[in-house]
Structure formats: structure tokens, C-alpha cells
Image: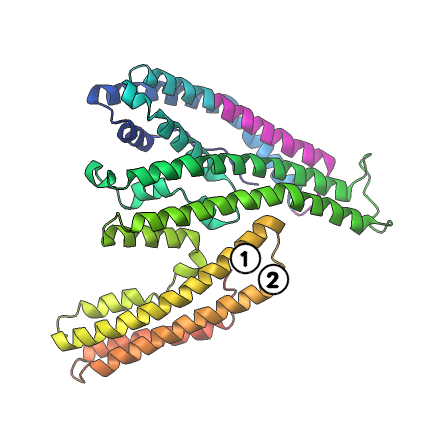
Amino acid sequence: MDNRFPASINPTDLLTYSRLLSLSEEQSAYLNFLYEQYAEQWNDLLDREWGQLDGLNAWTAEKMQGHPIDWEAAQRYENFIMREQAVENSELLLESTLFKRLGDVLTTEQSSWMWRVTSHRERERCDVIPMGWPAARIDLSALIDEVIRPDDEARSKFDGILIDYEHEVTDYFVEVDHVITHRLVKSTWMAAKWHYEADGSQIDTHKPNYLFEIQASFDELKSNELREEGDLQKKIVECNKKTLKRLRDLLTPTEFDSLDKAFRLRAWPEVYIDSYDPELFYSRICRDTSLTPQQRSDIDAAWQLSHQRYDEVSLKMSEESDKSAETFVRTLGFPDFPSYKKKMRDYRDDRWKIDDHFADQVLTVLLEEQSSLRRNVSEYKKWIKQGREAGKNDSYPW
């Protein structure tokens, strides 16, 4: 059982707060002073609470491992969640004190942007949510800071879009955190009820209506917590995609490509983490100084068409991935997994065929005396062939 306790405020966060509030040097120094006090109190809190919290976590995880969940395990799990929330509330008090004291030295203009600091922290606190939809785990504002790191002038061109984004998406993160926490506790009690009578004796699984009762309780979970959980995660995904599209025209092509690639890798890792990425092969070929201008032009033309076809297949794969993820968060299952698996494997094979065809096109452009380049292309084709052979027996997309 994973510990879902969020990380504390860290020095990188201070830089974000300073930027969001346009702090002066003196104000930033004061923020660092407040942080030192916060960090000391946070460490004291962990020293007092972590042993008991970790002990509850370890006991419950061991009790649940490979065994039906009984009433004691369910109660221990609820105790663990409640203790975790109590420690989290204590940390909340510490950070609220930090933010309040920081607010005392802000100008009126700076104070009007304090909500961005607190909403940044709220989203950061939700980073440990065990969400089943990868695209719903992404905080686009944080991703921009990580990938692009724009200066103030560059940020001013699109910061209004991020303000809209943060206004909308923060509540979704906070709400889904509450819903998932409630669902985890409720489903643990449900599991105990499925296996044990109120007196602790094992339930008779052959009794009349046993399976009907289990299905009815799970249907109730799907109709309430899982439905709400799915709706909220879908809202985050849609907000991320909508905001990414709005940013396209306000970022430089290089910036947007970097952001879009980072987003895709996080949102659809089974699609875009590609060991046979043809772009790496294309870049390696283009670095060779023996290519003539005409060869480069021919290879570029072939690459543009190949890259377009590769992206079209990848888009279909990401759409299938989203459908599967949404089904999972709403049902905690994959009722159509065999169909999903076949589609994803067929699409993967289609991409390999596209990669192999591009390599053949490069070969037709190269001269016989360009032996080093031809060897690189042949090795790439051999690598693809080996991947397709191994792929017949692997577990992709898992």
C-alpha cells in the first residue's frame, strides 16, 4: 500500500512563488526566512508522527497482501487514512502560517495574485493521487516551468492563458483527491463485507444472493464515487488538452514542440515512449556530413511524409489509450481489454512498417560509396525486424 502523503514546500517552490508575486529581493529574503522556520517545524512534525504513520501503513499493507480484507484490516486502513489526513492538516497549518506572514509584506497588487501561490500548492499536494488516467495527473503550469522555463518577457505572452487554466483546473484536482480518498476507504470496507460476517466469521460464499449482493454494492460504487471520479479526471484531461491548443500560437515552434512532446510522454507513455523512435534515426542520418544537398532534400521529403503517417497512427493510439483509461477509472476494470490490446499492437506494428519503409527510402537515396551511412540504415532496419519479432510474444501495451 503506497503512502499518499504529499511532499512539503521545497526551495524550488520558493522560486515559483517569487515569480508569481514579483517579489523584491528583500521580500524574497523574507520568504526564505519564513521557509527556514517552516522546514524546521515540518521536520519536527515528521519526527513526531512518521513512525506511527509508517507503522500503520506497513501493517495494513502486509495484512492485505494476498489475503481477503477482514474488519480489522479495514479499520486499520481507515485509521491510516485518518492519521495521514491529521498530519496533512498539521502541515497545512504550517504553510498557512507561512503564506499569511508573507502576505503581511506584500503590496496590494502582489496580494491580488496570492491565489496563484496557494492554488499552485493545492495542485502540488494532489501530485500523489493514485489516478488511473495518466493525462489527468499533469499540471500544465508546472510542466511549462519544468520544460520551457520562460523568462518574464516570454511568459507575459501566454500567462493569461495559464491564469484561466489555474482558475479552472485547481478545483478539479482538489475535488478528485477527496473523492478518491473516500472511495479507497469505502471500497476497503466493502471488501471486508464481501468476505466476513459482522462477528468476524468467514462468509458463506454459496449463500443465496451472495454474488448479487456483491454486484449491487459495486454497482452503487460505480454510480457514485467512480462516476464522480471519472467525471473529474475527464475534466482535467479536457482542460489540459484545451489549454495546450491555446498555447500553440503563443509559444515559439521550438517551445511548443518541447512542451507537446513532454505532455505526450506523460499522458500516453505506452504510445510515445518508443524504443524505435524514427526521429532519432532521422537526426542521426542528417548529422552525416557526406550527404549532398539533393540527398538531404530527398531524405527530408521522405521524412515529412513518414513523420506525418507516424503521428496519425500515434494519435489513434492515444485516443484508444484515453478510452481505456476512462473505462478503468469509471469501473476499476478493463472489460474490453482484449480488443484494446489487439488494436494497440496492430497500431504499433503499423508504425514499425512506416519506420522500415522510411529506412528503405533513405537507402535508395544513398550512394554505394556511402558505406557508413548505409550500414547505419541497415542496422536500424535489423533493429526494427528484431523488435517486431520480439513483439509477437511481449505483453504490450502493458
Mark 2, Cα crowd under 10 Å, few <14 / some 14-19 / many 20+, is few
Please say whether residue 188 is visible from this viewpoint.
Answer: yes
Q: Where residue 38 sits: x, y (%)?
A: 38, 20
Is residue 375 highlighted in magenta?
no
Q: Is residue 159 above or below residue 376?
A: above
The three-letter code of the residue at mark 1 reads: Ser
Q: Is residue 267 left or right of residue 14?
A: right
In the rendered structure, are the residues bearing label 1 and label 2 in contact, judged by CB atoms less than 8 Å apart? yes
Q: Earlier in the sequence, mark 1 or mark 2?
A: 1
- Assign a secondary structure to mark 1: helix
Q: Which residues are magenta?
A: 66-91
Q: Which residue is located at x 42 percent, y 62 percent? A: 315
Q: Quadrant of residue 195?
A: top right
Q: What residue would you read off at disc 2?
A: 336
Q: Where residue 50 sits: x, y (%)?
A: 51, 27
Q: Where residue 11 sits: x, y (%)?
A: 31, 30
* Rendered image: mark on residue 363: none
The three-letter code of the residue at mark 2 reads: Asp
